[in-house]
Image (cartoon, rainbow, N blue to C red):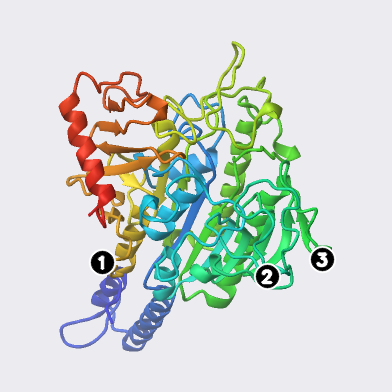
Amino acid sequence: MMLPYFQRRLLLQCWRKDGHYHSMGKTFPFRCLLMVLGLLLLSCGQDKNTKQAHPNIVLILADDLGYGDLGIYNPNSLIPTPNLDKLAMGGIRLTDAYCPVSVCSPSRFALMTGTYPFRSRKKSGVMSNYEPSLIEPDQLTLMQMLEKKGYTTAGYGKWHLGASFPTMDGKKPVGYGKFKADNNGANIDLSRPVSGGPVDHGFEHWLGFSCASECWVLEGNKIMGILEHDYYNVDAAQNKEHLKLFPREQYLSFITDRSTQFLTDHVDKDKDNPFFLYYAPYVPHIPLAVSDNFIGSTDAGLYGDYVHELDFYIGKLLKTLDSLQLSDNTLVLFASDNGSTFTATSRETDFSKVSNNLKEMEVKVADQQVHNPNGKLRGTKQTVWEGGVRTPFIARWPGNIPANTISKELFALNDIMATLAAVLDFDLKENEGIDSYNLLPVLKGDDEVAIRTSVVVQSGRGDKGLRMGKWKYIEPNGANMGKGELYNLENDLSEAHNLIDSLPRRAHELSGALAAIVQGNSSK
């Protein structure tokens, strides 16, 4: 057993060549023997405290948060985000990280499987009500990989990757395949468990909804509550009187409390084994549901208030890690699943007119302080422009990731799987995480070799693009009138100057590279 350096030095000070012990020039064999025994006991205690082979992991995934919302990414942001800014200062922040799809479900699929979502059965859009799992039964997920390495896995908030709901009449649930339907959920059998949901894909503990428009909140595989919503309801459902009602403005605090309780319980009951916590709030997704304490707290309107509230609760989660003395051995990751819905917000913005399923939101504001959620980036959620697909990405792991560092290396949410596999020394098979790259060297500050040379990005409609080096190519689609787009992001981050006509050879090169990735079985 190797003693720490300071303990070895004390022993050397006490040891003489003639085999006797001494201290301060006087011989004290018994006293030094006691010191040796004490140091050995201390070392054994340290071995017990550090025997956890792998770090704890906390993955925070915001919902529709923009690249320009955080102060650490955008000096002009009107939203105070002290906790996320502090998290970034304690680790690395990536400037060129991608979702890689500008809507919820496919980005979460990429995150959970390390696979581009265009390889799944759903080529565009998000999962609608009661659709079965988008993840194949034999497809390895991030959570299952962690389970294989002895992790306790827990998730709170939002799933949106599908689950199968039992019905009383054996038919499909009323509202299947839609987002809003008369008599939604009228034939759901609330007494029976769902299948194909989070606990069937690797979560030992789960509390959250499958799809917001379904309204059902699951604990494990059982329906335990109803998410009250501005646009959706389950009024037609039967035998629901025993279920807990969750007003949307209380949901964020609820899942945060349950997340922190999981941390406390884990330390009490299973502290020698690592945990994975997936914290996935439904914030700042519209319709905005800011709690009373945060209304009016920013100059960016209700949207800014909602992001500020999210930052507060993320701070509560991070402070719990501190209080439980978990922070030093916990890898914390933060990202958004896609860009913000809004191009501009202010105190004067009328959010009551915001639709729940908009393609691209343009908010007109008067000449006062204006906040741009996606910063200087063009586009919003749903689009394939940078405002839709670029995400703030932060990683903190004390002693392993250098503090207050920035990287411009390409990164995608699908890379989290291979990166964590490297942390765990887990060998992914050829058919596992097929579009996931190990970016651990980048997170640890090694930018000498570019690991990922390109990223495929995709709009909510399914239009694809390719980021390669400084170039960004977008295939012909309805948004560009069938012409295609080419941008030099090094000189034109806002994608204001389409070079498709002036650089046709470059466009053709990127078009071919995109086609090769899409048509191949893997992007590696």
Circle 1 SS class = loop
Circle 2 SS class = loop
Residue wearing tag 1: 430
Check the image and report above or below for 311 versus 270.
above
- Disc nearest the viewer among 3 and 2: 2
Q: State the CA–CA distance, disc 2 to disc 1.
A: 39 Å
Residue lying farthest top?
367
Crowd band around label 2 with a 10 angstrom C-alpha radius: few (<14), some (14–19), many (20+): few
From the viewer's perspective, tell me whether residue 97 is left or right of residue 346. left
Quarter where residue 419 is shown: bottom left
Residue 210 in sight from this viewpoint:
yes
Residue wearing tag 3: 239
Which residue occupies 21% across, 42% down? Answer: 513
Quarter where residue 120 is shown: bottom left
- The one nearer the camera, 448 or 476, is 476
Dot placed on the residue nearer the N-terminal end, 3 or 2: 2
